[in-house]
Amino acid sequence: MAREGLLIERPLLRMTQEQVERIHQASMEILMDPGLICFNKDAADIFQENGAEVTTLPDYNHPAWLIKIPEQMVLKALDSAPKTIKLGARNPENALIMNGEESRVYYITGSETNIWLDVDFPTYVKKADSSKEIQVPEFIPRRGTVADLCQSAHVCEHLDTLDGYIRTVNIQDKDITEENKDVNKYFASLNNITKHVMAGLTSLDQLDNVVNMAEIITGGKDQLKENPIISFITCLVKSPLQFVEDTTDTFIEICKRGLPVVVSSAPQAGSTAPIKEAGIIAQINSEVLAGITLGQLVNPGTPVLYGSVPVRARMDTLNDSYGCVETSQYNIDCVQLARYYKIPNYSTSGVCDPKIPGQQSSIERLFSDILVTLSGPQYLHCTYGLLDCNSVFCLPQAVLDDAHFKMIKFFLRQPIIDEEELADVLKQIRTVSGTPQKIFISYIRKVMRSGQLSEAYPFDGDGEGDNVFKLACEKTQALLEKPVDHIDEATTSTIFKEIPGLLPRLNIYQ
Amino acid sequence: MSEDIISKLKENVIQGRKTEDDEGIEEDLTGPGVIELTQQALDANIPANQIIMDGLTSGMEVVGEKFSTKEYYIPDMLASADAVGAAMDLLKPHLEKSGVAGKGKFAIVTVKGDIHDIGKNIVAILLKGAGYDVYDLGIDIPTEKIVEYVKNEKPDYLGLSALLTTTMVVMGDVIEALKSAGIRDSVKVLVGGAAVSEEYAKEIGADFYCLDGFDAVKKLDALQAA
């Protein structure tokens, strides 16, 4: 039992097969020359024990090694990495089954933003004519809280197109510390959504607490293995080509536990990667492959996702530009590379540059959502509610995005063109052309009621007004009023007894 | 027996089944449609006014209610109106005998230079379904032919349709030609079409601007009731 996702029959390709193979070869060259700088001793040891060329780098303030990874080691790792990965869910019907060779897209939230956007609708009166007034959305940014995260997971539970949940907001309450952040963010998410929950870890010390929590919910170690309701994101390779110390530690420990993990790399074309497409793609590919190789050396068969978050730099600020066209190009290239390796891909779309919802946001997010979807990544994240690159989350924007994904999913239905269908429509054409009115309307009704027609835009304004955002806010409120299947009282009680650091206010039974 | 026919007639109007071959909204509805049932009603000597009031009009009232609550959409409304229009054709010879006063004769036309007729045809279906005696003169019809028709056939209403800004000016020409022929006051002129507006209708001296077919029925029915 799993969610259906969206199967892309003929994925959009940017590169020819020859270009894909050239990029692969270039990445293999990068892994040997210049290789990667590694700031994590365990990783350096693991690579060395398995035959990689590892040399100490004396010129750094921190212990560092240069690692040269041969192609055979990478190919062996790719061979042992699972081609099909299951991400489980509290409701087993919400599980995600991802096959690296099949372009079945799942839409996921994420990523962790610092800012939560509240929305108000103040009334403005026209100076020249006080009888005329309009309501305009006002966006109020503030630091995200654990209550926001609960609210976000609650609404996301009810978004039809949303397949899995990455925490949308960084919880910054006064009583949240580095020591208790992980358990609280996982619990707040898991308790408010029955879909898959993924997050990054703030502290490696919390890994076992988080895993124990998931085992309590699923019923034990074996049950969690069978139904991995949680997974992890790790950005262990910092661009360009550096294994960082702490996240690499975390990654190694997750791999030892055999839980699903994303090996994510996020180079910026222009600053931390070459501005040229071939350059950033070859580099990100080598960074992700290096991570995957380490994971398979630690624990062969660990379910790893090929995580790609490439982005182009803005020329005016050198900040990330998720809204620019090239960012979508890079992502589509990475989808193709992951498919070449048959590893499920964690891709990125829907992120935009502006800080608030509006026209620019809609255009940028739809542009990338449509195109990256067409390329067929298995796990498409960042797709709901994100603004200002990855800095701001707006819940009504996530509700709007859900409507837009319904349109994209509808568009990607396969056409029905067969003998029976053609016989039916030819009969219609012959019949109607013989009537004086020459109108096909009488044939609409059956099709209209069969679900074969796309739905009207749910935030359609009346008259000339654009009420999209107002209507999205009303829909958000309505979704918040719908019930959520929380973790039951007995399990909650066990979790609060056994897992340290949970905030008492998150226990809905007390 | 007659109650059964009328009840089925009403149900088939609601379902928009013009003939027995048509599909209704309910999958399993089969048997005679509105045309066949109207003929059965006439064969059973049910008076035309009873067929209209208890079968057709009563059915259309339900369709109207369903439309207003968004259970039905325009295609449903049109299917029902088309079925009622076809029934009215069958009933026409029996109306006088039955003492039914018609709602009036409505000539509808797309003016010279314009070949667009989908909107006009939809308006015609709705008017016919609402009980008007509709005559469709066609598309790209010269002004003098329209005037000649009004002079000879004396319709109560003349509906002029134009899609384009380049052809909507011809609607003004038609009104001027009716004036020149001394028959402007003999007919109410209604205008409509994508490029036409309330202001433009006033400017050329039309009696009514109709936003769409539903608006046309509403305005004409209001005029009848006045």
Image (cartoon, coloured by chain):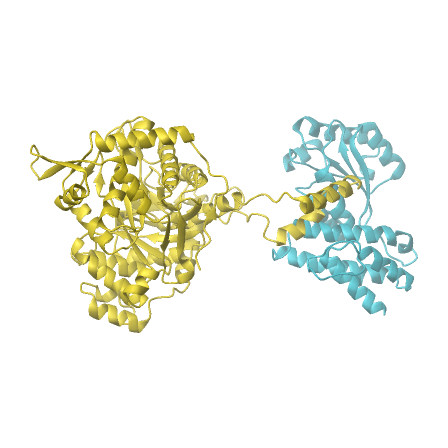
x and y, in percent, of residue A196 in the image: 35, 56
x and y, in percent, of residue A12 in the image: 46, 36
* In the foreground, A17 or A287: A17
Q: What is the letter of the yellow chain?
A: A
For residue A465, above or below residue B56: above
* In the foreground, A379 or B155: A379
Answer with left or right where residue A83 lies relative to residue A173.
right
For residue B107, above or below residue A227: above
Q: Quadrant of the N terminus of chain B?
A: bottom right
For residue B59, above or below residue A437: below
* In the foreground, A109 or B106: A109
Answer with left or right where residue B104 lies relative to residue A417.
right
x and y, in percent, of residue A143 in the image: 24, 50
Residue A352 in view, yes or no: yes
Answer with left or right where residue A333 lies relative to residue B14.
left
x and y, in percent, of residue A5 in the image: 45, 50
Q: What is the letter of the cyan chain?
A: B
